[in-house]
Amino acid sequence: MSDDFIPPRGTLDWLPARQAARHAMLDRFRAICEGSGYAEVATPVFEEKALFSRTAGESSEVVGKEMYLFEDQGERVLALRPEFTASLMRLYLGNGMSREAQPVRVWCAGSCYRYAAVQRGRYREFTQVDAEAIGSDDPAVDAELIALQLRWYDALGLEGIELRINTIGDKGDREPYLAVLRDYLDAHIDHVDEEIRRQRDLNPLRAFDTKHPESQKVMADAPKIADHVSEAAREHFAAVRSFLDARGIVYTVDPTLVRGLDYYSRTTWEVAWPELGAQSGIGGGGRYDGLAESIGGPATPGVGFASGVERVLLALEDQGRLPAPATRVDAFFAIFADDARPALHALLDQARDAGVRCEADLAGRAVKGQMKQADRIGAARTVVCGDDEWARRACLVRDMASGEQVEVPLDGLVEFLVNAKG
Ligand code: HAM
C-alpha cells in the first residue's frame, strides 16, 4: 500500500475505544427512541439523485455542492444519501403508513455522505442518528422530538449544549418574505459578499449563514422571516414553545436560524456545543409539511431531527465523558507449559462458548511479561498453567484486583470462570 492511503489529518478513526463508545451511544439512542414509541427502520445507502434535489433543493449546499453522484448501468443518476429525511418520507408514503395510527414514529442510524473539505467534525462519510414523526402537525410532536434529542445528549452526559429554535412559516409565507429580503439585499448589495450576491435570486435565505463579517452585520438588521409568517404559523410556534417551557427546556429563539435544507416549514432548531469549534452543530431538525408533495405524495405533515454521531463523540471526548468500554477481558490465559497449550486453548474456546471473554498469550512472553499483558488489557483474572500445574492437570486462577490465587482442576475450569464472572 502506498503512502497515499494513509488517512489525512482530520479523519476520525474508529479505533477500539471510539468504536466501543459509538456502540454505547447508539444503544442509548435506540433505548430512548424505543422508550418513546419510535420504531427502527432502514433506508438504502444510494438513491435517485432526484429524491434529494426535489426535497432538500438544488440551491442547498447539500444538494448543490456536496452530493456524491454516479451513473449506474441503466443511466440513472444516483446519489449516496446525504441525509435520511426524504428517504423516510418516501418509506412512509410507499408503504401505506398513512393508514396506521398517526403520527408514525420512526428512527434510524447509519452512514451519510457529503463532499466537503474534511476538518475536525466534518467528514465525507459520517454517521447520523435520525428520528421522525410523520403524519401530525400537532406542535406537541415538534416539542417531543426536541425533548427526545436532548434526552439523548443528557443520557450521554454531554454538558453545555445550546438549543436555538425559530419558525420559518409555511410555503405560502415564503415568496412574499423573500421579495422583502431581496429588496433589503439590493439596498445593501455593496456591503455583502460574492456568495450572497450569487444566491440573491436562487436562495437569499442562505445569506443568514454567511461567515463574512461585513455581511453578518448587514444580515443582523435584515428583515427576519419569523416577522413575516402567517398567524397560523405564529400560533403553532407559540404552542411549540409552551410545550418546551412546560418541560423546563432552555432555548434561545434565533430569528436568523433558517437551516440549510429547502424542505423546512414552521419549526426549525439546532443544537450546538459552541466549544467544539467551527463545526459545533451537533444536531438539527425541523418540520417539513411540504416535503411529501414535492415527491408526488399527498400533503403530509412531518417533523424530525438528525444528529451527527462523530460530532457528539468529539464533544464527549473533549468533556472527558466518552462512554467507557465494558471490561474487555474476563480471563487472560498465561500458559507456560508448552505441552498444555492445545488442551488450554480448547478450554479457552469452551469458556468463550459459555460467555466468558478470554484471551491467551500468543507472543511467547515470559511470566512477568504475561502478567503485565494481563494488567494492560484490564483482565479480571489470569489463568496460569506452568509445568507443575500441568502435571497435576490443574491451573492457578489469579484475581487481578485482590491478588488472591486459587488452584482449579482443569476439568472444573470453565465452570469456575463462569461462576467467578457472576
Ligand atoms: P443537517 O443539519 O444537515 O440536517 O445534519 C444533521 C447533523 O448531521 C448536523 O447537525 C451534524 O451534526 C451532522 N453532519 C452534517 N454534515 C456532516 C459532516 N459532513 N460531517 C459530520 N457530521 C455532519 C439533516 O440532515 C436533516 N435531515 C435533519 C432532519 C431530520 N430534519 C428533519 N428531520
Image: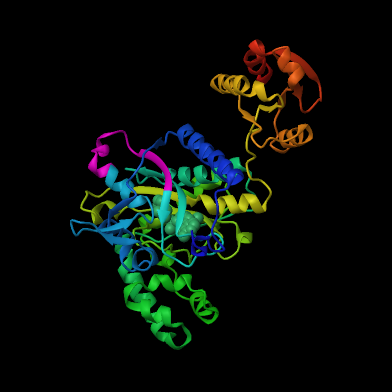
* Residue 29 percent location from the top left of the image: 50, 40
* Residue 95 percent location from the top left of the image: 24, 39
On the rendered image, what quadrant is the C terminus found in?
A: top right
Residue 361 magenta-highlighted? no
Give the side of residue 415 with respect to residue 219, left or right. right
* Residue 182 percent location from the top left of the image: 36, 78
Relative height, residue 350 to residue 213 (above, below): above
* Residue 41 percent location from the top left of the image: 36, 39
Residue 101 magenta-highlighted? yes
Q: Describe the colour scheme in one phrase.
A: rainbow
Residue extending furthest bottom?
Answer: 190
Give the side of residue 286 with respect to residue 9, left or right. left
Quadrant in the picture for residue 9? bottom right
Residue extending furthest right?
Answer: 403
Magenta span: 92-110
Residue extending furthest left?
Answer: 74
Image quadrant of ligand 1? bottom left
Residue 388 visible somewhere in the drawing = yes
Relative height, residue 255 to residue 129 (above, below): below
- The residue at 62%/16% (across/down) is 414
Question: For this rendering, which residue is in front, 208 or 225?
Answer: 208
Relative height, residue 15 to residue 331 (above, below): below
